[in-house]
Image: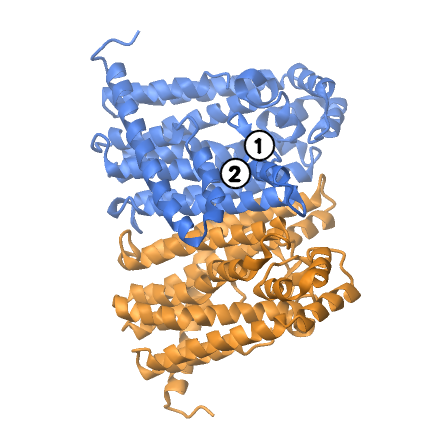
Chain colours: A orange, B blue
Amino acid sequence: MVHPGSPEAEAAREQAEYRKVLGAELDGFLAEQQLVLQDVSMESLPLLDAVSSLAQGGKRLRALLNYWGWRGAGGAELGAPAVRSGVALELFQSAALIHDDIIDRSDTRRGGPSVHRRFSATHSQAAWHLDGTHFGSSAAILAGDLCLSLSEEMFSAVGAQAAHGTGARRIFNRMRTEVMAGQYLDILEEVVGPTHEPERAVVRARNILRYKSAKYTTEHPLTLGGALAGASAELLDWYSRFALPLGEAFQLRDDVLGVFGDPEQTGKPAGDDLREGKRTVLVAYALTFGGPSARDAMAEGLGRADLDDDGVAALRGLIQESGALAATETLIEGHTQAAFDALEQLPVDDVTRAALSALAHAAVNRSA
Amino acid sequence: MVHPGSPEAEAAREQAEYRKVLGAELDGFLAEQQLVLQDVSMESLPLLDAVSSLAQGGKRLRALLNYWGWRGAGGAELGAPAVRSGVALELFQSAALIHDDIIDRSDTRRGGPSVHRRFSATHSQAAWHLDGTHFGSSAAILAGDLCLSLSEEMFSAVGAQAAHGTGARRIFNRMRTEVMAGQYLDILEEVVGPTHEPERAVVRARNILRYKSAKYTTEHPLTLGGALAGASAELLDWYSRFALPLGEAFQLRDDVLGVFGDPEQTGKPAGDDLREGKRTVLVAYALTFGGPSARDAMAEGLGRADLDDDGVAALRGLIQESGALAATETLIEGHTQAAFDALEQLPVDDVTRAALSALAHAAVNRSA
């Protein structure tokens, strides 16, 4: 129960306000961009529509962490820098998803078609010429590029607090480079194959998880918000001690859901991560623990787009029996514990702590 | 002959200095980025290598126009803002090329393999697993994303002159959105097919050329440099009157070379633009002038990756006989004339005018 007037109630109230302002800022920005595209040609608008429909969904985890990072460091309630940086983070996330879905050949995103599938569907409905799949990917590359540019345009619009030489700008720059490097390591891991240095598979998978996902999902947004409000180095360090393990637990949970989740709840077909050949920590553990025959079976089935339900069930069985699922759950528990331990000691006001606690619980206890 | 002490000689000397400083700034920036990627993993470095090797080539047309735009508006010799914005423009161009080559399925760039081909070659040399073509495209998507982010990081590093709310920032933002919208129109034009509203084909092709290419090749760099130095609205207007037709003439020449150019000089296979199905102004004229049978033949051959030398020669013949080549040359002449007329009246010093004149001549009189 949340009592009226409690830090929890106050945090929920303020967060709902922030969500509204964030949504309005995003809508206003996209409306301005629409005018720019219209000046080029009305026919270019579907490119922005693809960005808009994706950016208007999602849990807003990054924007919210950024907001409470700002508030915990003494930033003003609903302060404009935290609104704009929140929009920038959500647009960055959308850009990453658009390109990620091309790379992972994902057909769905947030319960609807992914951007490249959306464009290839338009192509086939209109009975256009040439290769519709290639058109879909090409249009999605451009939509992702536009979205990445808009993310940065919005981040620069924060103004002085995000100018060259500030801590916030350094975090934003580093975040982008690290995500792209992490994504590259991820696709590299898939192609070097499951038999490449299996003794280091878990180390590599954890490194990919950290850079491709954990840091930019939780740590960078929280520290970015803090830096915008002029947080001390000590506070930023505390933010990292809370948010990095939280992000790791969050992504590990995502990996477990990608293999064992209920499609009704995740909005993605069961076992899709296995068909895409994702080299998660879960899979790395299975390769490490599983012995030669399990390893061969994993190598054979992983990344096969035509893997049927029985094939998915067989791989799931291997992951479970090898102890990989249990090891991953242990890791999630350890990271979660570390995050909540740090949260208790975080030198922030009670409302911020209550807000971060609610976000952290939602991030690690979820089924979708 | 360029006489010592003449504006031409002075411009050449200063431009050579600028090139050196520009190269050093780019190298220093890439070296810093290397440290960021190394922190993630040594295995992520090929992503940056791909960016570096592409960004270190090229004619530097955009950086140089940006520099003379700055100088013509009273900016200091070798001023840091013009160096950094020059690097930002070159990185933006590299990012656009990396993604463009995936979209156009181009195997070569600047005489070497394109970035996606480079990664797929690494894949096949190392005998890695899964689909090497898909790995190549995926890695190149990420390399382009990294390059786009770095372009912006460098532009923000210009500092106060490029901060939110400045004219320079507005130009930079608009440039990116317009290029992406223009590229989308370009791929759309290919798939809607050669029979879509042929009476408007030339209008559409000229619009694509303007936004996808001309504005960001010449007009935006020149006005951006001017805006950084605080140019008046009147001077910026003069810059546009010179640079936009120059950019249009430049790209039209590029289109002619893409069909009629000597592969030895262009570094691209003969007729590659026809195999890629590029819907240039040249092709639009051929569709407009050619009559039904020529139109059918164009529709049949354009965009066929397996088009052989005879097929290329046949399409070339149609383009020439229909009067499309002559019409395009007339257009190039008109734009070139307009650009040089404006250059004569440009309210800038003699050294800047001499420099712009040399760049303009190089842009329109070329065989590669």
- The residue depicted at 45 percent of the width and 34 percent of the height is B53
Report if the CB atoms under discs 2 and 1 are less than 8 Å apart.
no
The CA span between labels 2 and 1 is: 22 Å
The reply to whether residue A41 is visible in this rendering is no
Question: Residue B126, image x and y in percent?
Answer: 61, 40
Residue type at numbered disc 2:
Ile
Compare residues A290 and B151 and report the one nearer the observer: A290
Q: Name the residue tied to disc 1.
A: B205
Chain designation of label 2: B
Chain designation of label 1: B
A144, above or below B123, in the image: below
Which structural element holds mark 1?
Answer: helix
In this rendering, do the residues under marks 2 and 1 share a single chain? Answer: yes
Residue type at numbered disc 1:
Ala
The reply to whether residue B259 is visible in this rendering is yes
- The residue depicted at 39 percent of the width and 27 percent of the height is B61
Question: Residue A110, image x and y in percent?
Answer: 60, 65
Q: Earlier in the sequence, mark 2 or mark 1?
A: 2
Question: Which circle marks residue A141 in the picture?
Answer: none
Compare residues A361 and A328 and report the one nearer the observer: A328
B145, above or below B361, in the image: below
Q: Name the residue tied to disc 2.
A: B98
Which quarter of the rendered picture does the N terminus of chain B lie within? top left
Mark 2 nearby-residue class (10 Å; few <14, some 14–19, many ≥20)? many
Mark 1 nearby-residue class (10 Å; few <14, some 14–19, many ≥20)? many
Q: Judge depth for marks 2 and 1 and give the one in front.
A: 2
Compare residues B360 and B112 and report the one nearer the observer: B112
Compare residues A188 and A268 and report the one nearer the observer: A188
